[in-house]
Amino acid sequence: MEFSLAYEMQRPELDDHAVIEETIEQCILADEMGFDSIWFVEHHFLTTFSMSPCPEVILSAIAAQTKRIRLGFGVVILPYHHPVRVAERVAMLDHISNGRVEFGTGRSAPYEQTGMGIDPRLTREMWEESLTMIPKIWESDTFEWEGRFWSVPPRQVLPKPYQKPHPPIWVAALQPATYQIAAEKGIGVMALGVSAPSVLEPHIKAYRETIKDAKPVGNFVNNKWLSSCFGLCGEDNEQTQELCARSLKTFFGPGRPYVQDQKDVYARLLDQWGGIPDHLAQNFSRYIDVEGQVGSANGGSSAAFDLSGGGALAQRIWEEFDAATMAERGIIVAGDPDSCIEAVKLHEATGVDQLQFLMATETVDHQNVLKSIEMFGKHVIPAFRKTQEPAG
């Protein structure tokens, strides 16, 4: 099992300089404490939410101050950039870091796409064309291309990546259709939907089967599955779980970027979290609209409730979803070290290769993040290493 951190570069009040300094300090500590990778998003225009428009810049700064931790684009929004520029920037960082780059790809969301002058309806095709081009740019002495969105006359493109043949390729995925595409193209899945491991397990198994017959877009198959969740380790089990749950709910709260303009988002989040817990089903039993059916941890669904009225009921149930149940299901990996270890085991049992934690949010302050990184390094990560080496 590999462990990584994800960065949106959030802060309660976005102080650009402070969030950069704090983020770099956290990443240096993560390197020292045995984390395998760090991943940086690419966001634009989310001025009250995220300050990470150019991940290659901060990753370069971190590369110069770390020794072994891998540096992940989580992700490059391919429709925004000319594929030649993507290939150049990824290869340059790969050299600066002595071959530590992970190349994640994605398409973003309509609010950001339209801000860049991109038609959201075209982004799937743009992503596929760019994804096809970039490995060919890396492997070609002279590259040329005539496509729907980009045309390149015969040109040499330098540098080539430090890693041979090239960095591992991934795609951000929120739904089964993308898991399938990833398997067919032989690239890794970054499952960023924050789902209970029990919900993802059948999708992981399907991915493993499909990828056996992959036609890789690159020079090798990256048969890896990454699952993202919120994580926080502290000395006080209940208090730490409550803080982590609050962080998650703030992140996905009404009007926030990852839920904005989505239909029935809280009903879908409840399903992603394994259904409505029995105690909440009882609390909301007066709303049951299906004969005798109640959503439960044993496969129940929010569909058992009347969720009419714009999803208000689903949102209320979601808001009351308790931290202890989140931790028990592995939706969050939070609490004292023992609780974190038990939650990681749930993910490990599904066949996940890498568990990615979002710790640093507008809800969790810098000192709590540093403490959590240290405790993961000292107590949690060693429990999943075949050969244990003292961290720090």
Image (cartoon, helix red, strand yellow):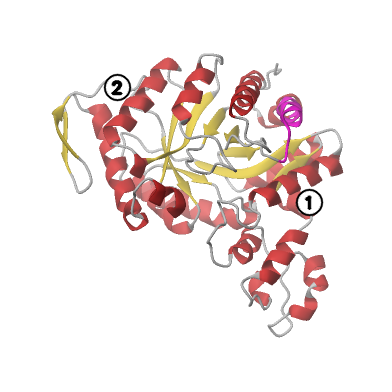
Name the residue at 78% across, 43% down.
243
Can you give x and y, in whole percent of width and height, for residue 189 in the image? 47, 45
Residue drawn at the location 46% of the way across and 24% of the way down? 57
Q: Mark on residue 304?
A: none
- Left or right of 269? Residue 298 is right
> Which residue is identified by label 2?
160
Disc number for residue 323: 1
User: How packed is label 1: few (under 14 Cα within 10 Å), some, or many (20 or more)?
Assistant: many
In the rendered image, residue 36, in percent from the top left (x then y), is placed at 58, 27
Confirm or deny contact between disc 2 and disc 1 (CB under 8 A).
Answer: no
Measured Cα–Cα span from mark 2 to mark 1: 47 Å
Q: Is residue 289 magenta?
A: no
The amino acid type, in three-letter code, at marker 2 is Lys
Which type of secondary structure does the marked residue at label 2 adopt?
A: loop
392 sits left or right of 159 in the view: right
**In the image, is 136 to the left or to the right of 310?**
left
Residue 121: x and y, percent? 34, 58
Mostly what secondary structure, the magenta segment?
helix
Q: Is residue 48 left or right of residue 286?
A: left
Above or below residue 26? Residue 312 is below
Q: Image quadrant of residue 188?
A: top left
Mark 1 residue element: helix
The span shown in magenta is 363-375
Q: Where's the C terminus, which quadrant?
A: top right
**Is residue 367 found inside the magenta-colored segment of the image?**
yes
Q: Is residue 198 above or below residue 311?
A: above
367 w.r.t. 269: above or below:
above
Residue appearing at x 64%, y 58% in the figure: 254
View extreme (left): residue: 154
Task: Report x, y in % for residue 155.
Answer: 16, 26
